[in-house]
Amino acid sequence: MKIPRFDPGYLFLFITHDMTKPHMESIVATEILYPSLSEESWVNTPDKIADYLFSTFFVAEYSQTYLYKGMVSSFPWIIQNAQGDILRTITDVRQNLTSYFSTYFDNVIIEVNDVTNPEEPSKVGLSIYAKFTDKQGVDHVLGKLLRVSNSIIESIINLNNG
């Protein structure tokens, strides 16, 4: 059986009536799909996809896969490599999230700001603003507020209206 090359924009389905002769047909994907390992399976709404992207970014390990070595967007890896340099952390988070979100959306704008409390210098806060356009041309805005203490994420708060 010859399997066609995977092209973005196409979703391949195995259709078989006789298990000895499987064949493959393709249909054009009309929406963005994100594979989740939850009961939701394929996530197809832009806000949920963005939420999954944020979530996986915060928990992913940079070296969790050999197949995509060096291509995993990982907040823990950024924190480890920046070693307390907040400007480098901000730059790396912005670059990684822009690249990551651009895989699924157009016109991606990511802003990251330091909201550190001078009374608690060992704790760092980052506000993350994301604006992007889905395939239907609709703009979406999301915001997160992170509190990090000694390289450990203490909390992630959703911000209303970015």
Image (cartoon, rainbow, N blue to C red):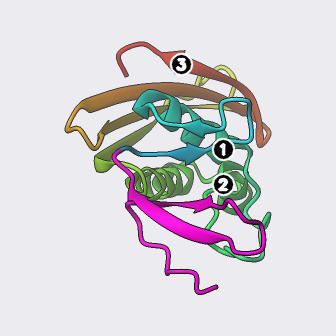
Sequence-wise first label, 3 or 1: 1
Q: Nearer the viewer, mark 2 or mark 1?
A: 1
The residue labelled by disc 3 is 158
Q: Is residue 152 above or below residue 57?
A: above
Q: Find the residue positioned furthest to the left.
A: 137
The residue labelled by disc 1 is 56
Please state which of residues 122 and 22 is positioned toward the viewer in this rendering. 22
Disc 3 and disc 1 in contact, CB within 8 angstroms: no
> Disc 2 to disc 3, how far (Cα)?
19 Å
Q: Find the residue positioned furthest to the top.
A: 160
> Disc 2 to disc 1, how far (Cα)?
8 Å
In the image, the segment drawn in magenta is 1-30
The residue labelled by disc 2 is 74
Q: Is residue 61 left or right of residue 4?
A: right
Main secondary structure along the magenta-highlighted residues: loop
Please state which of residues 34 and 24 is positioned toward the viewer in this rendering. 24
Q: Residues within 10 Å of mark 2 (few under 14, many from 20)?
A: many
- Residue 40, x across and y down, in percent: 66, 30
- In the image, what residue occupies the spot 46% across and 55% down? 91
- Residue 71, x across and y down, in percent: 60, 70
